[in-house]
Amino acid sequence: MKKLFVIYLLICGSLFAQNYKFAWITDLHIGSPDSESDLDSVVNLINYDKDLQFTLVTGDVAEKGRNSELESAKLILDKLTKPYYIIPGNHDTKWSESGTLKFNELWGDNKFYFEFQNTVFIGVNSGVLMRGGGGHFTPEDIKWLKTKLNTVTKSKEIFFIVHHPLNEDIDNWYKVNNILNDYNVKIILCGHGHKEQVLDFNGFPGVMGRTTLREKKGSWAFNVVENNADSLFFYTVESDTVYNKWHSLKKPDILSSPEVDSSDFINYSVQIILNKDLDVTVSTPPLTWDNKIYINQFNGILSCFDTTGTLLWDYDLYSKSISKPIISENTLIAANLSGDLFKLDPYKGTSILSIGFNEPITSQLIDIDYNGTYDNIMLPKETDSKKAIIIGTASGKLFCYDLETLQELWQNKDAKAMIETTPLFYNNKLIFGSWDSNIYCLDSRKGWLIWKQSPNKNFYYSTAVSSPVTDGKNVFVTSPDKNVYSIDINLGKLNKSYKCDAWETIGISTDTKQLYIKSMKDKFYFVSSKSLTKNKEFDFKFGLDTMPSTPIEYNGNVIFGGKNGNVYMIDSKNKMQTLFYMGSARILSITQLNDDYFAALNMDGRLVIFRLEQGI
C-alpha cells in the first residue's frame, strides 16, 4: 500500500510539471588557449535563447586554479541574464593558490541546492583539497547532502550534479550512492571527461557533458537539457545555434541501485591503540609532541589530544588552514589562509602572540637555527634564542620571522607563484619549490638567492609539492613527469635524473644512502642517493596513487600511507606488509609518536595510533 501511495505521488507531481529547458556548461578551463572567448560566445548564445531557464556549471572552471582565472570566469558568467549554479572541479582545487577559498569568495559556496517546478537540483563538490588524481566527497559535504535531502518529499524528482563521474573516479562514491538510494533520483550529471557520454552509475542513469572549449578544427559548444514529464532529452549546441539531439532517456518510475557495503577499518598486523574519527577535512599530517597529537583541521580549528584520544583543548585560528603547525622551544606555531601567524602555549592552547600577513600562508611551517643578524627588528630580544620560523605564501614570498618576538628578519620575493611544500633547511640554506616550476636555494641568514633550478619548466610537472631531501651533497625531489632529480646543493647544478614512475612522494633513509619513492602506480622503490639507480623494487599493487606523503624509517622498517586508505610497511627483511586499512580517504604522512608508536591521519579526520608487533 505504501509503495502504491509513493507511485501516486510521483504521478501527481509529474502531471503538474511543465516542460522546460536549461543550459549545462562544464570544463571551462579558463586560462587555457581561447577559453575566455569560447565561454563568452557560449554565454551570449545562452542569453539569446529565451527558452533556457537557468544554467548549470559543473566544474573545472579554471585551468590552473589561479585566482585571476576564477575572477575572469566570474566576469563572463555574470553576464548570464538568468540564474546559474556552479560547483568546482579538480583543476579548481588541486592548484588553488587560495587554498580553495577564492571559489567560495566569488560564488558564496562550492555546492548548491535549488528547486525548479517539481525538481530538486543538488550539486556537490568532488574536487580534493590541494590534491589531484581523482575525487572525494568531504565529511562536511556528505552531512550537508543528508540534511538537504531530508527536506525533500518523495514526490519531487532529484537531479544530482557532480564534476567527477559517480564511480571509482571518486574514492568514496559509494557513500553518496547509498544516500541517493532513498530518494527519487532521475539523473546524475557530471563533467570531467570533456565529451558527451551516456553512463550508468550503479543503476543510476548518468550523462557526461562536453567541454565549452572548441575542439580541434571545431567549435565551442555547450549542452542543453530538456526536462519533460516522463523523459529527458540532451542536445549539443555549437556556433551554428542548431540543437543536435544526441541522447534521450525515459525517466524510471522507481530506481533500483544496489547498496554498496564497505568497511571503514580493517586491521591486519598491528596493535591498534586508538581509532578515532573526527569526521572533518584535514590536509596536513598530525603533529606529535610530548605524548600529544595536534591536528590542524581545514576549518581552522586546531585540536590537541592525548594518546587516549581525549580532547585537551581547541583553538580557533579564525580562518581555514592548510599549514602543518610546528613546536619549537616549547612553543606552538600555527598559520591560516587569512595570513595570520599564531604563537600558542602547547599545553593549554592559549594565545601568546599573533601577527597578520597580507596574503594566505600556504606552505608547511618549519623552524630553523638562525645565524644571521637582528638589525631589522624594532623590539629588542629578551632571550638568546636563535630560533626562527619560515613561512611561504600564495604569491611566492618566503618570510623568516624571529620565534621569540614574531618580528620579520627578512623576506624573499624571487619565487613568482605559490609555495606549498615543506622547505628544507640544511647548513644555512633553505631549499623549496614553487608553482612557478622553479626550485630555489636561499641563504637562511639574509634571504638572498644562492641558486634556482627548474628540472621541468612545464607547470603540470612542477616539483612544487615534493618536499626536498638531502644527503648533504645533493638535493633530491620528485616530479609528476615521473622522475627523481638530483641537484648539487651548493651549485644548483642538475646532476642527473632517474625515471621510476615517481610523482610527488620522496623520503630518505636515516643514513642518507637510500631514497624512498612511492610511485604513481603500484610500485615502491629504494633508490641509491649516490648513483640515482634502483636498488630494490616492491610491487604493492595499490593502484593509482598521486597522494604525496613522506615515508618514514624505523629500525630498518619503512612505513608509508596510500591514497587507497592502506598503511604499508617494508620490514627490515624487505618483506611487504599491509598494516591496516583506515577508510577510503587519502592518508597523510605517518608520524612517529614515540619509540614504536605511530600516528596515522587521513583527510577525513580519522586518527589511528598504532604499534608495530613486537620483534619488528
Image (cartoon, rainbow, N blue to C red):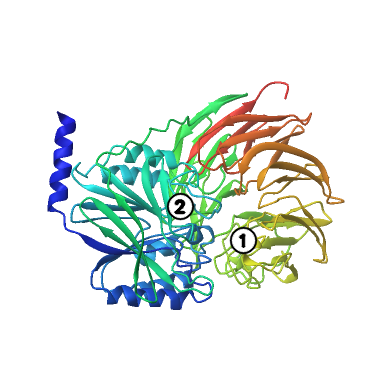
Question: Which amino acid, mark 2?
Answer: His
Q: Which residue is mark 1?
A: 402
- Badge 2: few (under 14), some or many (20 or more) residues near its Cα, within 10 Å? many
Q: Is residue 309 visible?
A: no
Residue 95: numbered disc = none
Task: Name the one closer to the observer, 348 or 211.
Answer: 211
- Badge 1: few (under 14), some or many (20 or more) residues near its Cα, within 10 Å? many
In the picture provided, is 355 more to the left or to the right than 489?
Answer: left
Q: Position of residue 430 (x, y in %)?
A: 71, 61
Question: Which amino acid, mark 1?
Answer: Asp
Q: Please, what secondary structure does the residue beneath circle 1 have?
A: strand
Q: Position of residue 586 (x, y in %)?
A: 54, 43
Question: What residue is drawn where x is 51% and y is 67%?
Answer: 63
Q: Image quarter for residue 208? A: bottom left
Question: What residue is drawn where x is 60% and y is 39%?
Answer: 289
Q: Image quarter for residue 227? A: bottom left
Q: Is residue 136 visible?
A: yes
Q: Nearer the viewer, mark 1 or mark 2?
A: 2
Question: What residue is drawn where x is 47% and y is 45%?
Answer: 349
CA distance separating discs 1 and 2 = 45 Å
Q: Dividing the image into 4 quarters, which one contains the N terminus?
A: top left
Q: Mark 1 or mark 2: which comes first in sequence?
A: 2
Task: Name the one closer to the observer, 233 or 4.
Answer: 233
Q: Which residue is mark 2?
A: 164
Above or below residue 567? Residue 324 is below
Q: Position of residue 363 (x, y in %)?
A: 58, 58
